[in-house]
Amino acid sequence: MVSVYSNAKINIGLNILGKYSNGYHKLDMIMLPISLSDRMDIEFKGKKGKLKIKCNIDSIPTNESNIIYKVYNKFYEITRLDKEEIEIYLEKKIPSQAGLGGGSSNGAFFLKELNKYYKCILSEEEMIDLSKNIGADIPFFIKNIPCRVQGIGEELIEIKNNLQCKILLIKPNFGVSTKEAYKLYNKLENPKKANIKTLIESLKNNKLNDINQYNENVLEQSLLEQNKDIINFREKINCIKKYTFSMSGSGSCYYLLLPNDKKICIKELKEKIGDCNIYICNFL
């Protein structure tokens, strides 16, 4: 039995530069790993068989539509090994449809453990290549370090994150499908792009004010055009004038970067925002 903690991520800056001929969007963004994590208990049975997944949340699929199962199938397809029986208990804490990469993280950390089980039969580059068409965020979680992420998510450039702050995640009681967010983006006119180079320098030099100033997410902009849930939620958090909230990925989760020397009353924040869950975490 191996217990693995697969962590979430947030985006700081998210631009879409175009579209490839295969329909995938060409991305340019920053991803940072954070401490909010799921736990996977993985038991390798040591005999031929299938993958079995159990989860603490009933709404999470445990069949072949689960990203872990897709990784399992692809790994054995690529390596041409005989499938072995593996049992996984997945304890979810990262909210789904939040833009935090929970499912991709599960897939990436399972792939790394599966590769270890077979004495690292695949290189890191091969794992990234194997997984990039399963989930766009999986390659990032293979590395799991602060990165500028480009291409469809498989081009990773390590960056420095020296921000001295806590992260408050504010997850409303609804989710956003990534597919919907990208579909709405295709209708967005004149998106305001993030200055990725400035954001990278600001992360390196611990300039939180500059992060808040230059952080833009074109997927949030598209959702704010037509998604009524996001429009209403954004209006609620905009009423809290003293903080700057940003959306992670395709949402629906927002985050607040709070300097370590500042305190915030979570109860008061929840009362102002309404029905939501708030998580306090750190950068990894």
Image (cartoon, grey):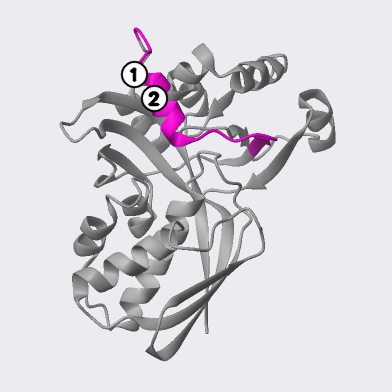
Give me the disc on residue 280: none
Q: x%, y% of residue 154? A: 25, 47
Which residues make up the magenta segment? 169-190
Q: Are marks 1 and 2 in contact (CB under 8 Å)?
A: yes
Which image quadrant for residue 197? top left
Q: x%, y% of residue 160? A: 36, 44
Q: x%, y% of residue 29? A: 34, 33
Query: Within the magenta stretch, is there residue 181?
Result: yes
Q: x%, y% of residue 265? A: 81, 34
Which residue has dot 1 on it? 186
Label 2: state its secondary structure.
helix
Q: Residues within 10 Å of mark 2 (few under 14, many from 20)?
A: some
Which image quadrant for residue 152? top left
Query: Within the magenta stretch, is there residue 213?
Result: no
Residue type at mark 1 is Asn
Relative height, residue 170 to residue 241 (above, below): below
- The one nearer the camera, 105 or 256, is 105
Give how far apart the Cα atoms at labels 1 and 2 are.
5 Å
* Residue at the image position 78 percent from the left and 29 percent from the top: 269
* Residue at the image position 79 percent from the left and 27 percent from the top: 274
Count of numbered marks = 2
Which residue has dot 2 on it? 183
- The one nearer the camera, 283 or 252, is 252
Relative height, residue 85 to residue 47 (above, below): above
